[in-house]
Image (tube, rainbow, N blue to C red):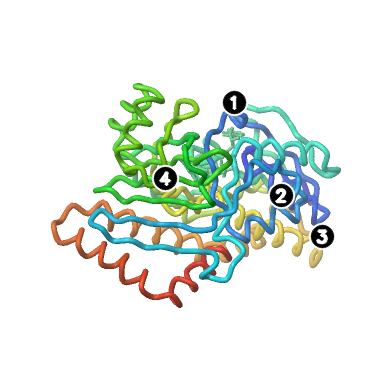
């Protein structure tokens, strides 16, 4: 029997998993990625209440610099033909609609916490190591190279990982505004483009989903060209905007793996968590929230199995099946919802635009439905 747990990937999911396991009394070894880009990650993540609770339980949330966390007090979603949907924390009787957290300080804090956690060992990158005895959790992100090896070894065939490129890239960066943001998040659906401004210290986090060519051209033209395009697109609603540095590009795709676990060899199994298991369009800001929910469930399932049957090895597939069963429904629902929203606003049919804008207005008129939507989004 081997009880080792290896985690491949030191992104948010991998580090949060190592800390969650340590919290439950389980030791793990985190293997770093081939390149370290955490400090230059320009994204601002919208996190829900469940993610906040997990990070607070890991003693990470309270250690974040105050400037790295901004509560969302209100959100305005604007359609491409005048439809508007507005949410407010006050109306939903919640302290916030969610929290915008800068990626770089969050990753730094998770890493510091892991460095000091007694049951976590941090190891440097290992290229294509032999299948380790025990369990390897693949938190390698959406391009996980070990995932394919795992599927092949487990005989899962080619189709367990379904991928669909959106033909868009997200332009992400930090935006300064001449007006205080007041905790207001903005989102514009503009004839297939999705533009979000997320309130953060000194301005906004930008996530702008654009066709690849336009996104690449804007990035190449630099901060001034991006700011000019942004000011045209937002019409001054969020104040006069300027970019504080150039933006990063993230090609977007939908990916959903239906086979979440398997064995590399007898006594050596693998399981997927975070973006290695699912990648979704960032229009609803839910990718990492899903990944942190994976982390919570996987840590609970592994800890419970160790308590109930201490003689079992961590490679036991029946335990991993429990995790897969619990995650299947929520991940499938979220992936479908985000994709349906994307498809609804990308639809070029002339009747589609009035219908989707009417839909926004109709939901906007229903306060109880909006309150329910806010509660669902906060719970994750
Ligand atoms: C523009 C944009 C905006 C987003 N906004 C939001 C948001 O508002 N809210 C939200 O919840 N989500 C958001 N997301 C999604 C979120 O960024 C991801 O879900 C999250 O980063 C996934 O974390 P992860 O740890 O699973 O993967 P990653 O962040 O991809 O980390 C994977 C890690 O594995 C390492 N690695 C890679 N290969 C190997 C290997 N062979 N061996 C070992 N390690 C390896 C990498 O170096 C990296 O450190 C957004 C995504 C994008 C693109």
Of tags 1 and 3, which is closer to the observer? 1
Relative image position of residue 198 (x, y in whole percent): 49, 46
Query: Residue at image x 45%, y 36%?
Result: 172
Query: Residue at image x 83%, y 39%?
Result: 116
Neighbor class of circle 3 (other Cα within 10 Å; few <14, some 14-19, many 20+) is: few
Neighbor class of circle 4 (other Cα within 10 Å; few <14, some 14-19, many 20+) is: some
Pointers 4 and 1 in contact (C-beta within 8 Å): no
Relative image position of residue 235 (x, y in whole percent): 31, 43
Front residue of 156/126: it is 126
The answer as to whether callout 1 falls within 8 Å of ligand 1 is: yes
Tag 3 residue: 311
Tag 1 residue: 35
Which secondary structure lies at badge 4? loop
Q: Is residue 292 left or right of residue 151?
A: right
Question: How much space separates mark 1 and mark 2, taking CA atoms?
Answer: 25 Å
Does residue 246 lie above or below 91 as drawn?
above
Tag 4 residue: 238
Question: How much space separates mark 4 and mark 3, taking CA atoms?
Answer: 59 Å
Neighbor class of circle 1 (other Cα within 10 Å; few <14, some 14-19, many 20+) is: few
The answer as to whether callout 3 falls within 8 Å of ligand 1 is: no
Question: How much space separates mark 1 and mark 3, taking CA atoms?
Answer: 37 Å
Tag 2 residue: 61
First in sequence, mark 1 or 3: give its number: 1
First in sequence, mark 4 or 3: give its number: 4
Pointers 1 and 2 in contact (C-beta within 8 Å): no
Q: Is residue 267 left or right of residue 363?
A: right
**Quarter of the C terminus within the rendering:** bottom right
């Amino acid at each position: 029997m081997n009880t080792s747990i290896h985690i491949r990937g030191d992104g948010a999911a991998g580090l949060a998993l190592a800390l969650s396991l340590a919290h439950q009394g389980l030791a793990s070894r985190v293997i770093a990625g081939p390149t370290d880009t955490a400090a230059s990650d320009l994204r601002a993540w919208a996190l829900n209440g469940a993610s906040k609770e997990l990070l607070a339980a890991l003693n990470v949330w309270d250690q974040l610099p105050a400037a790295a966390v901004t509560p969302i007090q209100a959100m305005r979603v604007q359609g491409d033909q005048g439809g508007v949907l507005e949410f407010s924390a006050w109306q939903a009787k919640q302290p916030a609609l969610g929290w915008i957290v800068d990626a770089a300080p969050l990753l730094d804090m998770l890493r510091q916490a892991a460095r000091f956690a007694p049951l976590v060992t941090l190891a440097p990158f290992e290229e294509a190591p032999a299948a380790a005895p025990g369990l390897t959790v693949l938190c390698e992100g959406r391009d996980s190279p070990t995932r394919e090896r795992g599927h092949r070894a487990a005989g899962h065939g080619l189709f367990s990982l379904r991928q669909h490129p959106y033909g868009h890239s997200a332009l992400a960066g930090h935006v300064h505004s001449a007006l205080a943001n007041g905790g207001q998040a903005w989102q514009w659906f503009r004839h297939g483009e999705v533009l979000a401004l997320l309130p953060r210290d000194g301005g906004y986090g930008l996530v702008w989903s654009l066709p690849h060519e336009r996104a690449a051209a804007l990035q190449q033209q630099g901060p001034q060209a991006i700011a000019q395009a942004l000011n045209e697109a937002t019409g001054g609603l969020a104040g006069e905007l300027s970019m504080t540095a150039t933006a990063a590009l993230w090609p977007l795709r939908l990916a959903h793996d239906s086979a979440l676990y398997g064995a590399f060899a007898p006594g050596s199994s693998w399981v997927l968590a975070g973006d290695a298991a699912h990648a979704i369009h960032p229009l609803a800001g839910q990718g990492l929230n899903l990944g942190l929910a994976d982390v919570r469930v996987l840590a609970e399932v592994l800890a419970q199995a160790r308590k109930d049957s201490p003689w079992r090895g961590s490679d036991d597939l029946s335990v991993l099946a429990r995790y897969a069963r619990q995650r299947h429904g929520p991940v499938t629902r979220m992936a479908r919802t985000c994709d349906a929203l994307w498809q609804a606003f990308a639809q070029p049919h002339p009747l589609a635009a009035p219908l989707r804008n009417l839909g926004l207005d109709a939901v906007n008129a229903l306060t109880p439905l909006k309150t329910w939507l806010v509660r669902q989004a906060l719970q994750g």
